[in-house]
Amino acid sequence: MRKTNARKISDILLNYVDEMNIDNKLKEVDVIHAWEEVLGKTMHRYTGRIYISRGILHVQINSPVVKSELIMMREEIRTRLNEKAGRKIVKEIRFL
């Protein structure tokens, strides 16, 4: 006997993404990829490790001068990254 409760695979995947809270993780990846676009290639050259944990973006900066400049621009950078993500993903930025 054949079941008639067929569902689209896209609906199943969207439901799975919602249930597993994968959407936030995907948005975090978008934010990390947007880092170079937001700051430009020159500033991106000084970026080392970058990751998000509990809404805090951790960024290793390899130059004290660049780090000082980015600290002063922290809120503007956070706003632009969240705009790229389409919602508030980054609550705070910490430069390492």
Image (cartoon, rainbow, N blue to C red):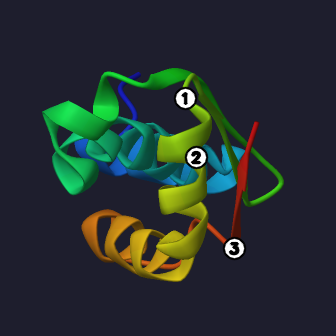
The image shows residue 9, relative to residue 69, as above or below, that is above
Which residue: 38% across, 65% down? 81
Check disc 2 and give the amino acid type: Lys
Q: Which mark is residue 8?
A: none
- For label 1, the residue is 63
Q: Quadrant of residue 64?
A: top right
Quarter of the figure with the N terminus: top left
Q: Earlier in the sequence, mark 1 or mark 3?
A: 1
Q: Residues within 10 Å of mark 2 (few under 14, many from 20)?
A: some
Mark 3 or 2: in front is 2
- For label 2, the residue is 67
Quarter of the figure with the C terminus: top right
Left or right, 7 with reference to 79: left
Q: CA distance from mark 3 to mark 2?
A: 19 Å
Q: Quadrant of residue 40?
A: top left
Which residue: 47% across, 73% down? 73
Which residue: 42% across, 25% down? 46
Report helix, strand or loop for mark 2: helix
Q: Are marks 1 and 3 in contact (CB under 8 Å)?
A: no
